[in-house]
Amino acid sequence: MISKRILQGFLFLNIFIIFYGYLVGFGKSLWFDELLTINQAREIFNINLKENLTKDPNSSFFYFLYYVEKLLRIFNINLLDENINLIRAINLIGIIPILLSYTILRNEKLQINLYIVFLLLISSNYFFYYILEIRTYFLLLSFTFLLSVLNLTDTLEIKYKYLFIFSSIIISIFHIYGFTISMSILFYRLILNFYQKNYIRLKINIYILFLLLLIFFLIYWLNISNPEVISKNSYLKFHLYYVGNFVRWNFNTLIFLFVASILIIFFKINKSSNIHNFINYFFNKFYLNILGQIIPIIFLLFVIISISLLITPIFHHRFFIIINPGLILIGGLLGFDLFKNNQQKILLIIFLTIMTFVNIKFYLKNITNSEQNIEWVVKKTFKQNCENSDVYFNDDGKVGILDHVNQIVQIYSKNLRPIKPLSTIDLSKFQNSKKINKDCEVLIFSFHTYNLEKNLDKVNFKSLVYEVNYAPNVIGENTSKAGAIVLIK
Protein backbone atom coordinates (compact mmCIF):
# COMPACT_ATOMS: atom_id res chain seq x y z
CA MET A 1 0.00 0.00 0.00
CA ILE A 2 2.85 2.41 0.86
CA SER A 3 4.61 1.65 -2.44
CA LYS A 4 1.35 2.26 -4.30
CA ARG A 5 0.91 5.68 -2.71
CA ILE A 6 4.53 6.60 -3.44
CA LEU A 7 4.08 5.63 -7.10
CA GLN A 8 0.81 7.56 -7.35
CA GLY A 9 2.47 10.67 -5.96
CA PHE A 10 5.41 10.55 -8.34
CA LEU A 11 3.15 9.73 -11.30
CA PHE A 12 1.05 12.83 -10.56
CA LEU A 13 4.21 14.95 -10.21
CA ASN A 14 5.69 13.79 -13.50
CA ILE A 15 2.39 14.20 -15.34
CA PHE A 16 2.37 17.78 -14.07
CA ILE A 17 5.93 18.26 -15.43
CA ILE A 18 4.79 16.99 -18.85
CA PHE A 19 1.67 19.18 -18.76
CA TYR A 20 3.71 22.27 -17.84
CA GLY A 21 6.25 21.57 -20.56
CA TYR A 22 3.51 20.98 -23.12
CA LEU A 23 1.88 24.33 -22.42
CA VAL A 24 5.18 26.23 -22.43
CA GLY A 25 6.57 24.39 -25.44
CA PHE A 26 3.45 24.63 -27.57
CA GLY A 27 4.48 28.03 -28.86
CA LYS A 28 8.14 27.17 -29.58
CA SER A 29 9.53 27.53 -33.08
CA LEU A 30 9.09 24.70 -35.54
CA TRP A 31 12.41 23.33 -36.80
CA PHE A 32 13.46 22.49 -40.35
CA ASP A 33 12.02 18.95 -40.59
CA GLU A 34 8.68 20.06 -39.14
CA LEU A 35 8.39 22.99 -41.54
CA LEU A 36 9.36 20.70 -44.40
CA THR A 37 6.58 18.32 -43.32
CA ILE A 38 4.02 21.15 -43.42
CA ASN A 39 5.16 22.20 -46.89
CA GLN A 40 4.98 18.64 -48.19
CA ALA A 41 1.52 18.21 -46.66
CA ARG A 42 0.32 21.36 -48.41
CA GLU A 43 1.48 20.00 -51.76
CA ILE A 44 0.21 16.44 -51.32
CA PHE A 45 -2.80 16.88 -53.62
CA ASN A 46 -0.88 18.97 -56.16
CA ILE A 47 1.45 16.14 -57.23
CA ASN A 48 0.73 12.67 -58.54
CA LEU A 49 0.67 9.49 -56.47
CA LYS A 50 4.08 8.28 -57.69
CA GLU A 51 5.76 11.52 -56.62
CA ASN A 52 4.02 11.33 -53.23
CA LEU A 53 5.21 7.78 -52.63
CA THR A 54 8.83 8.54 -53.58
CA LYS A 55 9.18 12.04 -52.14
CA ASP A 56 10.31 10.63 -48.79
CA PRO A 57 12.35 7.43 -48.18
CA ASN A 58 9.63 6.51 -45.68
CA SER A 59 5.92 6.43 -46.38
CA SER A 60 4.33 9.76 -47.28
CA PHE A 61 0.95 8.82 -45.85
CA PHE A 62 1.46 10.63 -42.57
CA TYR A 63 1.49 13.91 -44.53
CA PHE A 64 -2.24 13.44 -45.00
CA LEU A 65 -2.66 14.02 -41.26
CA TYR A 66 -1.14 17.45 -41.51
CA TYR A 67 -3.36 18.36 -44.44
CA VAL A 68 -5.84 19.15 -41.66
CA GLU A 69 -4.56 22.72 -41.97
CA LYS A 70 -6.39 23.00 -45.29
CA LEU A 71 -9.52 21.41 -43.86
CA LEU A 72 -9.62 23.93 -41.01
CA ARG A 73 -10.05 26.72 -43.55
CA ILE A 74 -13.60 25.43 -44.06
CA PHE A 75 -14.24 26.85 -40.58
CA ASN A 76 -12.34 30.07 -41.39
CA ILE A 77 -9.33 28.97 -39.34
CA ASN A 78 -6.18 29.93 -41.23
CA LEU A 79 -3.10 28.61 -39.44
CA LEU A 80 -0.79 30.49 -41.77
CA ASP A 81 -2.21 33.84 -40.73
CA GLU A 82 -2.89 32.94 -37.09
CA ASN A 83 -0.75 30.32 -35.38
CA ILE A 84 0.85 27.51 -37.38
CA ASN A 85 1.77 25.80 -34.10
CA LEU A 86 -1.87 24.76 -33.60
CA ILE A 87 -1.15 21.89 -35.96
CA ARG A 88 0.91 20.32 -33.14
CA ALA A 89 -2.38 19.25 -31.55
CA ILE A 90 -2.66 16.47 -34.17
CA ASN A 91 -0.29 14.45 -31.96
CA LEU A 92 -3.04 14.17 -29.36
CA ILE A 93 -4.41 11.36 -31.53
CA GLY A 94 -1.62 9.33 -29.93
CA ILE A 95 -3.35 9.58 -26.53
CA ILE A 96 -6.12 7.28 -27.84
CA PRO A 97 -3.96 4.12 -28.20
CA ILE A 98 -2.28 4.93 -24.87
CA LEU A 99 -5.68 5.08 -23.12
CA LEU A 100 -6.71 1.88 -24.89
CA SER A 101 -3.52 0.25 -23.63
CA TYR A 102 -4.29 1.34 -20.07
CA THR A 103 -7.81 -0.08 -20.30
CA ILE A 104 -6.55 -3.40 -21.67
CA LEU A 105 -3.80 -3.75 -19.04
CA ARG A 106 -6.27 -3.02 -16.25
CA ASN A 107 -9.04 -5.30 -17.54
CA GLU A 108 -6.76 -8.24 -18.31
CA LYS A 109 -5.43 -8.18 -14.72
CA LEU A 110 -1.86 -8.97 -15.76
CA GLN A 111 0.98 -9.24 -13.29
CA ILE A 112 2.33 -5.84 -14.19
CA ASN A 113 2.81 -2.63 -12.22
CA LEU A 114 0.74 -0.03 -14.10
CA TYR A 115 2.27 2.88 -12.20
CA ILE A 116 5.78 1.86 -13.22
CA VAL A 117 4.64 1.35 -16.83
CA PHE A 118 3.17 4.82 -17.24
CA LEU A 119 5.89 6.53 -15.22
CA LEU A 120 8.50 5.04 -17.55
CA LEU A 121 6.37 5.88 -20.61
CA ILE A 122 6.16 9.59 -19.82
CA SER A 123 9.74 9.69 -18.46
CA SER A 124 11.49 8.99 -21.74
CA ASN A 125 12.87 11.74 -23.91
CA TYR A 126 11.03 10.05 -26.77
CA PHE A 127 7.78 11.04 -25.04
CA PHE A 128 8.97 14.50 -23.96
CA TYR A 129 10.45 15.45 -27.30
CA TYR A 130 7.96 13.99 -29.77
CA ILE A 131 4.66 14.81 -28.09
CA LEU A 132 4.94 18.26 -29.69
CA GLU A 133 7.00 17.61 -32.82
CA ILE A 134 5.11 17.72 -36.10
CA ARG A 135 6.39 14.39 -37.33
CA THR A 136 5.07 10.85 -37.19
CA TYR A 137 7.18 9.65 -34.23
CA PHE A 138 4.73 10.23 -31.36
CA LEU A 139 2.08 8.25 -33.20
CA LEU A 140 4.64 5.50 -33.78
CA LEU A 141 5.38 5.46 -30.05
CA SER A 142 1.74 5.29 -28.97
CA PHE A 143 0.59 2.68 -31.50
CA THR A 144 3.67 0.52 -30.90
CA PHE A 145 2.87 0.72 -27.18
CA LEU A 146 -0.61 -0.59 -27.95
CA LEU A 147 0.77 -3.43 -30.13
CA SER A 148 3.21 -4.43 -27.38
CA VAL A 149 0.38 -4.46 -24.83
CA LEU A 150 -1.74 -6.65 -27.13
CA ASN A 151 1.18 -9.05 -27.46
CA LEU A 152 1.48 -9.17 -23.67
CA THR A 153 -2.18 -10.18 -23.19
CA ASP A 154 -1.65 -13.40 -25.19
CA THR A 155 -5.15 -13.05 -26.67
CA LEU A 156 -3.97 -11.11 -29.70
CA GLU A 157 -5.34 -13.58 -32.27
CA ILE A 158 -8.77 -13.89 -30.66
CA LYS A 159 -9.98 -10.99 -28.54
CA TYR A 160 -7.87 -8.22 -30.05
CA LYS A 161 -7.09 -9.39 -33.58
CA TYR A 162 -8.92 -6.53 -35.32
CA LEU A 163 -7.33 -3.94 -33.05
CA PHE A 164 -3.92 -5.45 -33.79
CA ILE A 165 -4.58 -5.41 -37.55
CA PHE A 166 -5.78 -1.80 -37.51
CA SER A 167 -2.85 -0.59 -35.37
CA SER A 168 -0.32 -2.52 -37.47
CA ILE A 169 -1.65 -1.00 -40.68
CA ILE A 170 -1.56 2.51 -39.19
CA ILE A 171 2.09 2.38 -38.11
CA SER A 172 3.13 0.44 -41.23
CA ILE A 173 1.86 3.17 -43.56
CA PHE A 174 3.42 5.88 -41.38
CA HIS A 175 6.99 4.53 -41.19
CA ILE A 176 9.06 1.57 -42.38
CA TYR A 177 10.07 0.88 -38.77
CA GLY A 178 6.39 0.68 -37.88
CA PHE A 179 5.99 -2.14 -40.40
CA THR A 180 9.16 -3.80 -39.03
CA ILE A 181 8.00 -3.87 -35.39
CA SER A 182 4.56 -5.14 -36.44
CA MET A 183 6.17 -7.99 -38.38
CA SER A 184 8.59 -8.71 -35.52
CA ILE A 185 5.70 -9.16 -33.07
CA LEU A 186 3.86 -11.24 -35.65
CA PHE A 187 6.86 -13.55 -36.21
CA TYR A 188 7.13 -14.05 -32.47
CA ARG A 189 3.45 -15.00 -32.34
CA LEU A 190 3.93 -17.39 -35.26
CA ILE A 191 6.77 -19.20 -33.52
CA LEU A 192 4.91 -19.26 -30.19
CA ASN A 193 1.69 -20.65 -31.65
CA PHE A 194 3.56 -23.19 -33.77
CA TYR A 195 5.46 -24.38 -30.69
CA GLN A 196 2.22 -24.61 -28.70
CA LYS A 197 0.51 -26.34 -31.67
CA ASN A 198 -2.26 -23.76 -31.60
CA TYR A 199 -3.02 -23.95 -35.33
CA ILE A 200 -6.16 -21.77 -35.26
CA ARG A 201 -4.12 -18.85 -33.93
CA LEU A 202 -1.29 -19.73 -36.28
CA LYS A 203 -3.65 -19.44 -39.26
CA ILE A 204 -4.75 -15.99 -38.10
CA ASN A 205 -1.09 -14.96 -37.78
CA ILE A 206 -0.46 -16.04 -41.38
CA TYR A 207 -3.49 -14.10 -42.68
CA ILE A 208 -2.31 -10.94 -40.91
CA LEU A 209 1.24 -11.47 -42.18
CA PHE A 210 0.13 -11.62 -45.83
CA LEU A 211 -2.07 -8.56 -45.34
CA LEU A 212 0.83 -6.53 -43.96
CA LEU A 213 3.17 -7.74 -46.71
CA LEU A 214 0.62 -6.66 -49.32
CA ILE A 215 0.37 -3.21 -47.73
CA PHE A 216 4.16 -3.00 -47.54
CA PHE A 217 4.64 -3.64 -51.27
CA LEU A 218 1.81 -1.29 -52.25
CA ILE A 219 3.30 1.57 -50.24
CA TYR A 220 7.06 0.99 -50.32
CA TRP A 221 7.78 -0.84 -53.56
CA LEU A 222 8.44 2.35 -55.55
CA ASN A 223 10.83 3.47 -52.81
CA ILE A 224 12.84 0.26 -52.42
CA SER A 225 13.08 -0.26 -56.21
CA ASN A 226 14.30 3.29 -56.90
CA PRO A 227 18.08 3.80 -56.48
CA GLU A 228 17.60 7.58 -56.27
CA VAL A 229 15.28 7.23 -53.28
CA ILE A 230 17.55 4.65 -51.64
CA SER A 231 20.51 7.04 -51.98
CA LYS A 232 18.70 9.53 -49.73
CA ASN A 233 19.39 7.16 -46.80
CA SER A 234 23.16 7.74 -46.83
CA TYR A 235 22.92 9.88 -43.67
CA LEU A 236 21.50 6.86 -41.80
CA LYS A 237 24.81 5.01 -41.66
CA PHE A 238 25.68 3.58 -38.27
CA HIS A 239 27.21 6.09 -35.83
CA LEU A 240 28.08 5.51 -32.21
CA TYR A 241 26.34 8.73 -31.24
CA TYR A 242 23.05 7.21 -32.44
CA VAL A 243 23.55 4.52 -29.81
CA GLY A 244 24.56 7.18 -27.27
CA ASN A 245 21.43 9.20 -28.01
CA PHE A 246 19.24 6.12 -27.68
CA VAL A 247 20.74 5.43 -24.22
CA ARG A 248 20.35 9.06 -23.11
CA TRP A 249 16.79 9.29 -24.39
CA ASN A 250 15.87 6.10 -22.52
CA PHE A 251 18.01 6.79 -19.46
CA ASN A 252 15.25 6.35 -16.87
CA THR A 253 13.95 3.12 -18.40
CA LEU A 254 17.36 1.52 -18.92
CA ILE A 255 18.53 2.37 -15.40
CA PHE A 256 15.34 0.91 -13.93
CA LEU A 257 15.71 -2.29 -16.00
CA PHE A 258 19.32 -2.72 -14.91
CA VAL A 259 18.76 -2.04 -11.20
CA ALA A 260 15.51 -4.04 -11.01
CA SER A 261 17.11 -7.05 -12.74
CA ILE A 262 20.10 -7.03 -10.38
CA LEU A 263 17.90 -6.73 -7.28
CA ILE A 264 15.49 -9.48 -8.38
CA ILE A 265 18.35 -11.88 -9.10
CA PHE A 266 19.92 -11.02 -5.73
CA PHE A 267 16.65 -11.64 -3.83
CA LYS A 268 15.98 -14.89 -5.70
CA ILE A 269 19.47 -16.20 -4.92
CA ASN A 270 18.97 -15.45 -1.22
CA LYS A 271 15.65 -17.33 -1.18
CA SER A 272 16.86 -20.32 -3.20
CA SER A 273 18.19 -23.39 -1.46
CA ASN A 274 19.89 -24.66 -4.62
CA ILE A 275 20.55 -23.77 -8.25
CA HIS A 276 17.54 -25.81 -9.42
CA ASN A 277 15.12 -23.71 -7.35
CA PHE A 278 16.79 -20.52 -8.58
CA ILE A 279 16.37 -21.52 -12.25
CA ASN A 280 12.71 -22.46 -11.66
CA TYR A 281 11.99 -18.88 -10.61
CA PHE A 282 12.61 -17.80 -14.20
CA PHE A 283 10.61 -20.48 -16.00
CA ASN A 284 7.04 -19.44 -15.35
CA LYS A 285 4.36 -17.47 -17.17
CA PHE A 286 5.50 -14.19 -15.62
CA TYR A 287 9.03 -14.35 -16.98
CA LEU A 288 7.85 -15.79 -20.30
CA ASN A 289 5.88 -12.52 -20.69
CA ILE A 290 9.17 -10.64 -20.38
CA LEU A 291 10.67 -12.90 -23.03
CA GLY A 292 7.67 -12.12 -25.25
CA GLN A 293 8.73 -8.45 -25.24
CA ILE A 294 12.43 -9.15 -25.75
CA ILE A 295 12.18 -11.52 -28.74
CA PRO A 296 10.37 -9.04 -31.09
CA ILE A 297 13.07 -6.46 -30.26
CA ILE A 298 15.75 -9.01 -31.19
CA PHE A 299 13.94 -9.78 -34.46
CA LEU A 300 13.69 -6.07 -35.20
CA LEU A 301 17.39 -5.40 -34.58
CA PHE A 302 18.37 -8.38 -36.72
CA VAL A 303 16.29 -7.07 -39.64
CA ILE A 304 17.57 -3.49 -39.28
CA ILE A 305 21.21 -4.57 -39.10
CA SER A 306 20.81 -6.97 -42.04
CA ILE A 307 19.17 -4.35 -44.28
CA SER A 308 21.75 -1.73 -43.27
CA LEU A 309 24.64 -4.06 -44.14
CA LEU A 310 23.24 -5.62 -47.31
CA ILE A 311 20.96 -3.01 -48.93
CA THR A 312 20.90 0.52 -47.51
CA PRO A 313 21.59 2.12 -44.11
CA ILE A 314 18.44 2.72 -42.05
CA PHE A 315 19.95 3.26 -38.60
CA HIS A 316 18.91 6.25 -36.50
CA HIS A 317 18.10 6.81 -32.81
CA ARG A 318 14.85 8.56 -33.80
CA PHE A 319 13.55 5.42 -35.49
CA PHE A 320 14.31 3.29 -32.45
CA ILE A 321 11.43 4.96 -30.67
CA ILE A 322 9.56 1.72 -31.45
CA ILE A 323 11.83 -0.25 -29.07
CA ASN A 324 10.87 2.00 -26.16
CA PRO A 325 7.38 0.48 -25.50
CA GLY A 326 8.77 -3.06 -25.19
CA LEU A 327 11.38 -1.87 -22.70
CA ILE A 328 8.71 -0.01 -20.72
CA LEU A 329 6.50 -3.10 -20.42
CA ILE A 330 9.48 -5.19 -19.32
CA GLY A 331 10.05 -2.53 -16.65
CA GLY A 332 6.42 -2.82 -15.54
CA LEU A 333 6.70 -6.60 -15.29
CA LEU A 334 9.93 -6.40 -13.26
CA GLY A 335 8.39 -3.67 -11.13
CA PHE A 336 5.51 -5.95 -10.20
CA ASP A 337 7.92 -8.62 -8.97
CA LEU A 338 10.19 -6.14 -7.22
CA PHE A 339 7.56 -4.04 -5.42
CA LYS A 340 4.91 -6.58 -4.51
CA ASN A 341 5.78 -5.85 -0.89
CA ASN A 342 6.95 -2.71 0.88
CA GLN A 343 10.48 -3.88 1.71
CA GLN A 344 12.02 -2.04 -1.21
CA LYS A 345 10.17 1.26 -0.75
CA ILE A 346 13.38 3.17 0.05
CA LEU A 347 14.94 1.98 -3.21
CA LEU A 348 11.73 2.93 -5.00
CA ILE A 349 11.79 6.47 -3.61
CA ILE A 350 15.46 6.88 -4.60
CA PHE A 351 14.80 5.74 -8.17
CA LEU A 352 11.68 7.88 -8.61
CA THR A 353 13.52 10.92 -7.27
CA ILE A 354 16.36 10.39 -9.75
CA MET A 355 13.87 9.86 -12.57
CA THR A 356 12.00 13.07 -11.74
CA PHE A 357 15.31 14.97 -11.56
CA VAL A 358 16.27 13.69 -15.04
CA ASN A 359 12.86 14.75 -16.38
CA ILE A 360 13.19 18.27 -15.00
CA LYS A 361 16.91 18.80 -15.58
CA PHE A 362 17.38 17.21 -19.00
CA TYR A 363 14.14 16.20 -20.74
CA LEU A 364 11.98 19.22 -19.88
CA LYS A 365 14.15 21.54 -21.98
CA ASN A 366 13.46 19.35 -25.02
CA ILE A 367 9.74 19.97 -24.78
CA THR A 368 10.00 23.69 -24.00
CA ASN A 369 12.83 24.62 -26.42
CA SER A 370 13.16 24.11 -30.15
CA GLU A 371 15.95 22.32 -31.99
CA GLN A 372 16.32 25.34 -34.25
CA ASN A 373 14.71 28.72 -33.63
CA ILE A 374 13.83 29.30 -37.26
CA GLU A 375 10.92 31.56 -36.38
CA TRP A 376 13.28 34.00 -34.65
CA VAL A 377 15.74 33.91 -37.57
CA VAL A 378 13.07 34.50 -40.22
CA LYS A 379 11.29 37.28 -38.35
CA LYS A 380 14.60 39.07 -37.71
CA THR A 381 15.68 38.68 -41.34
CA PHE A 382 12.37 39.37 -43.08
CA LYS A 383 10.81 41.83 -40.66
CA GLN A 384 10.29 44.51 -43.28
CA ASN A 385 9.89 44.89 -47.03
CA CYS A 386 13.38 44.50 -48.51
CA GLU A 387 12.39 43.00 -51.84
CA ASN A 388 15.24 44.77 -53.66
CA SER A 389 17.90 43.67 -51.18
CA ASP A 390 19.48 40.24 -51.57
CA VAL A 391 19.92 38.12 -48.49
CA TYR A 392 22.30 35.17 -48.27
CA PHE A 393 21.56 31.81 -46.70
CA ASN A 394 24.23 29.66 -45.09
CA ASP A 395 23.57 26.67 -47.37
CA ASP A 396 26.89 24.94 -46.66
CA GLY A 397 26.99 23.91 -50.33
CA LYS A 398 24.03 21.51 -50.06
CA VAL A 399 22.05 21.13 -53.28
CA GLY A 400 18.32 21.86 -53.25
CA ILE A 401 18.16 23.43 -49.79
CA LEU A 402 17.24 26.89 -51.06
CA ASP A 403 13.98 25.65 -52.59
CA HIS A 404 12.85 24.53 -49.14
CA VAL A 405 14.15 27.71 -47.49
CA ASN A 406 11.95 29.92 -49.66
CA GLN A 407 8.88 27.90 -48.68
CA ILE A 408 9.81 27.93 -45.00
CA VAL A 409 10.35 31.69 -44.96
CA GLN A 410 6.82 32.21 -46.28
CA ILE A 411 5.38 30.35 -43.27
CA TYR A 412 6.76 32.91 -40.83
CA SER A 413 6.90 36.11 -42.91
CA LYS A 414 5.20 37.78 -45.86
CA ASN A 415 8.10 40.20 -46.39
CA LEU A 416 10.04 38.26 -49.01
CA ARG A 417 13.56 38.98 -50.28
CA PRO A 418 15.70 37.39 -53.00
CA ILE A 419 17.57 34.55 -51.25
CA LYS A 420 20.94 33.39 -52.54
CA PRO A 421 23.42 30.81 -51.23
CA LEU A 422 26.24 32.24 -49.12
CA SER A 423 28.75 30.33 -51.27
CA THR A 424 27.89 32.59 -54.26
CA ILE A 425 28.31 35.93 -52.47
CA ASP A 426 30.10 38.76 -54.29
CA LEU A 427 31.56 41.01 -51.58
CA SER A 428 31.77 44.10 -53.79
CA LYS A 429 28.08 43.88 -54.75
CA PHE A 430 27.27 42.94 -51.22
CA GLN A 431 28.78 46.15 -49.83
CA ASN A 432 26.97 48.27 -52.44
CA SER A 433 23.70 46.60 -51.52
CA LYS A 434 24.34 47.40 -47.87
CA LYS A 435 24.80 51.12 -48.67
CA ILE A 436 21.63 51.27 -50.76
CA ASN A 437 19.46 49.30 -48.33
CA LYS A 438 20.51 50.64 -44.95
CA ASP A 439 17.23 49.63 -43.29
CA CYS A 440 17.68 45.96 -44.25
CA GLU A 441 19.98 45.10 -41.38
CA VAL A 442 20.28 41.34 -41.82
CA LEU A 443 22.20 40.32 -44.92
CA ILE A 444 23.03 36.70 -44.00
CA PHE A 445 20.94 34.15 -42.13
CA SER A 446 21.32 30.53 -41.12
CA PHE A 447 18.97 27.89 -39.70
CA HIS A 448 21.63 25.49 -38.49
CA THR A 449 25.02 27.08 -37.94
CA TYR A 450 27.52 24.26 -37.41
CA ASN A 451 29.81 25.71 -40.10
CA LEU A 452 28.69 29.33 -40.27
CA GLU A 453 31.95 30.82 -39.05
CA LYS A 454 34.01 28.62 -41.39
CA ASN A 455 31.78 29.50 -44.33
CA LEU A 456 32.18 33.20 -43.59
CA ASP A 457 35.95 32.74 -43.61
CA LYS A 458 35.76 30.94 -46.96
CA VAL A 459 34.25 34.03 -48.61
CA ASN A 460 36.88 36.35 -47.02
CA PHE A 461 34.57 37.90 -44.47
CA LYS A 462 37.60 38.60 -42.29
CA SER A 463 37.99 41.84 -44.23
CA LEU A 464 34.60 43.07 -42.98
CA VAL A 465 33.38 44.09 -39.56
CA TYR A 466 30.36 41.97 -38.78
CA GLU A 467 28.31 40.73 -35.86
CA VAL A 468 26.73 37.30 -35.50
CA ASN A 469 23.55 37.08 -33.41
CA TYR A 470 22.54 33.57 -32.41
CA ALA A 471 18.98 32.37 -31.91
CA PRO A 472 17.69 32.06 -28.31
CA ASN A 473 15.62 29.28 -26.71
CA VAL A 474 17.09 26.26 -28.46
CA ILE A 475 18.11 22.77 -27.32
CA GLY A 476 21.72 21.79 -26.78
CA GLU A 477 24.71 22.53 -24.62
CA ASN A 478 25.90 25.13 -27.10
CA THR A 479 22.62 26.83 -27.88
CA SER A 480 24.26 29.35 -30.20
CA LYS A 481 24.51 26.72 -32.92
CA ALA A 482 20.86 26.41 -33.96
CA GLY A 483 20.11 29.53 -35.98
CA ALA A 484 21.82 32.88 -36.52
CA ILE A 485 21.74 36.19 -38.36
CA VAL A 486 24.79 38.17 -39.53
CA LEU A 487 24.80 41.97 -39.51
CA ILE A 488 27.49 44.06 -41.20
CA LYS A 489 28.57 47.05 -39.12
Image: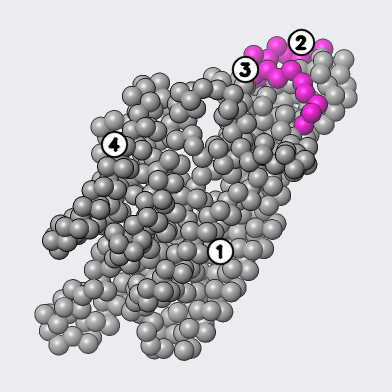
Residue 4, percent across and down? 48, 83
Range of magenta residues: 413-432
Residue 83, percent across and down? 74, 43
Q: Which of label 2 and label 4 is nearer to you? A: 4
Q: Examine the structure image and report whether residue 18 is included in the region drawn in magenta.
A: no
Residue 96, percent across and down? 52, 59
Tags 1 and 4 touching, CB below 8 Å: no
| Neighbours of disc 4 within 10 Å: few (<14), some (14-19), many (20+) | some
Q: Which of label 1 and label 3 is nearer to you? A: 1
Q: Residue at x 42, y 52 (%)?
A: 167
| Neighbours of disc 3 within 10 Å: few (<14), some (14-19), many (20+) | some
Q: Amino acid at mark 3?
A: Ser
Q: Which residue is mark 2?
A: 429
Q: Residue at x 68, y 17 (%)?
A: 420
Q: Closer to the N terminus: mark 1 or mark 3?
A: 1
> Image height check: is 431 above or below 22?
above
Kindly indicate the quadrant of the structure image that contains residue 378: top right
Q: Which residue is mark 4?
A: 307
Label 3 residue SS: helix
> Image height check: is 172 above or below 102?
above
Between the residue at mark 2 and the residue at mark 4, the CA separation in whole angstroms equals 50 Å
Between the residue at mark 1 and the residue at mark 4, the CA separation in whole angstroms equals 34 Å
Left or right side of 262 for 39 = right
> Image height check: is 471 above or below 145?
above
Between the residue at mark 3 and the residue at mark 4, the CA separation in whole angstroms equals 37 Å
